Image: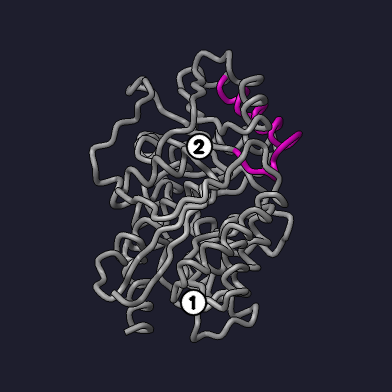
């Protein structure tokens, strides 16, 4: 165990997608694995770690209420400087496109520590959408040593940016590893729902939708609920007041619309398994739901995950009121259209992405 590898997690999606990698690395006799939690998300990160049995070795507890991105970045850089000097890792692994990922990549660059970027190469080619994630992953991609791309399309994006082919490894997405590990278990949803009614599951929290776009989304959800009294809607609401206040303003008084606190990882997978249709602006849900055979309408104008759109199991509807209502209603009414999207096609992996990542590191260090 002479190769020290630090695996960094900051948010709930990072914890979910890094968990299979951390668990696989911990089985390797050559690897001394250290888990660093920045806690960019606090509670949501903790419950995922508990579910997968991961106990961080270092916890920066960086989150503060209403923290600006500049403040978060500055505080992370200062904290990471001390951690990297103390840990002296041989490699650091990050996942995705959060401020944690971008900042860790920059700090490691300053310390000349090689970075492995899990879920590398996702691009919309628009720095404002999603914001700030597109910039975060582009910066991390410029500084990474190993690019663990989930798909061939992601590999092509990296090649287009000049990343050497020898540094890109197409692995599949570790979110499918985590999903298959979790979905095989007997999961409880923990929200009372009528099992005889179809369920529409909603998640929406993207920063670029704050303001009028999110109000349009909520207006569309209200119309769908009012026009489909026999369908139940479930929306675990993000605590950010830009989301929560508007969601409750539009949706709280509808008899067939359940608003609840964000669900822990396992109950959320149970909700996806139970759902008939999913409306979301989440990147991870775009990857997970098709693998479960659930049609997805994406509440964004662009996606860095075009593979599922190309397969016809995900459709972009943006924050356009008319388009959301029209496309959702069509899937609720038209069985042929529904079956065309509910095919269980997943272009994002076979559940063995973590093994491929560990194999690359093993071959490099041993």
How many numbered badges does the structure rendering display?
2
Q: How is the image coloured?
A: one colour
Q: In which quadrant is the N terminus drawn?
A: bottom left
Taking the magenta stretch, the answer to whether it contains residue 213 is yes
Residue 49 vertical placement versus 116 (above, below): above
Q: Secondary structure at mark 1?
A: strand
Q: Is residue 199 visible?
A: yes
Residue at coordinates 50% horizontally, 44% vertically from top-left?
296
Residue at coordinates 36% horizontally, 20% vertically from top-left?
192
Q: In which quadrant is the C terminus drawn?
A: bottom left
Taking the image as shown, residue 108 lies to the left or right of residue 59, namely: right
- Mark 2 packing: few (<14 Cα in 10 Å), some, or many (20+)? some
1 and 2 marks in contact (CB < 8 Å):
no
Mark 1 or 2, nearer chain start: 1
- Mark 1 packing: few (<14 Cα in 10 Å), some, or many (20+)? many
Picture quadrant of residue 177: bottom left
Residue at coordinates 33% horizontally, 63% vertically from top-left?
350
**x then y, percent, for residue 43:** 47, 37
Taking the image as shown, residue 202 lies to the left or right of residue 243, namely: left
- Given residues 156 and 322, the one toward you in this image is 156
Picture quadrant of residue 328: top right
**x then y, percent, for residue 45:** 45, 44
Residue 28 vertical placement versus 202 (above, below): below
Q: Which residues are magenta?
A: 205-225
Residue 146's label in the rendered image is 1
- Given residues 45 and 72, the one toward you in this image is 72
Report the residue marked by disc 2. Answer: 331
**x then y, percent, for residue 348:** 43, 61
């Amino acid at each position: 165990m002479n190769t020290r590898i630090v695996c960094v997690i900051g948010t709930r999606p990072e914890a979910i997608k890094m968990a299979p990698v951390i668990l696989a690395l911990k089985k390797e006799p050559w690897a001394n694995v250290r888990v660093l939690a920045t806690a960019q998300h606090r509670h949501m990160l903790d419950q995922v770690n508990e579910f997968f049995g991961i106990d961080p070795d270092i916890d920066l507890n960086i989150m503060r209420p209403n923290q600006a991105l500049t403040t978060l970045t500055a505080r992370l850089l200062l904290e990471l400087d001390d951690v990297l000097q103390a840990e002296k890792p041989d490699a650091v692994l990050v996942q995705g496109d959060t401020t944690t990922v971008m900042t860790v990549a920059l700090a490691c660059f300053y310390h000349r520590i090689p970075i492995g970027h899990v879920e590398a190469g996702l691009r919309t080619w628009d720095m404002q959408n999603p914001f700030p994630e597109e910039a975060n992953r582009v910066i991390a991609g410029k500084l990474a040593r190993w690019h663990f791309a989930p798909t061939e399309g992601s590999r092509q994006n990296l090649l287009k940016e000049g990343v050497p082919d020898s540094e890109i490894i197409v692995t599949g997405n570790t979110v499918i590893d985590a999903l298959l590990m979790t979905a095989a278990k007997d999961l409880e949803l923990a929200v009372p729902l009528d099992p005889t009614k179809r369920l529409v599951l909603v998640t929406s929290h993207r920063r670029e939708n704050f303001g009028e776009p999110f109000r349009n989304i909520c207006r569309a959800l209200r119309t769908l609920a009012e026009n489909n009294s026999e369908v139940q809607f479930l929306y675990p609401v993000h605590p950010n007041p830009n989301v929560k206040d508007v969601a409750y303003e539009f949706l709280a008084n509808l008899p067939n619309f359940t608003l609840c606190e964000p669900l822990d990882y396992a109950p959320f997978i149970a909700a996806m398994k139970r759902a008939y249709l999913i409306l979301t602006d989440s990147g991870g849900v775009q990857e997970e739901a098709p693998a479960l055979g659930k049609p997805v309408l994406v509440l964004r104008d662009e996606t860095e995950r075009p593979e599922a759109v190309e397969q016809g199991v995900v459709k972009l509807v943006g924050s356009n009121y008319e388009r959301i209502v029209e496309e959702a209603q069509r899937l609720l009414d038209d069985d042929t259209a529904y079956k065309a999207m509910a095919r269980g096609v997943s272009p994002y992996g076979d559940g063995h992405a973590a093994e491929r990542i560990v194999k690359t590191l093993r071959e490099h260090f041993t």
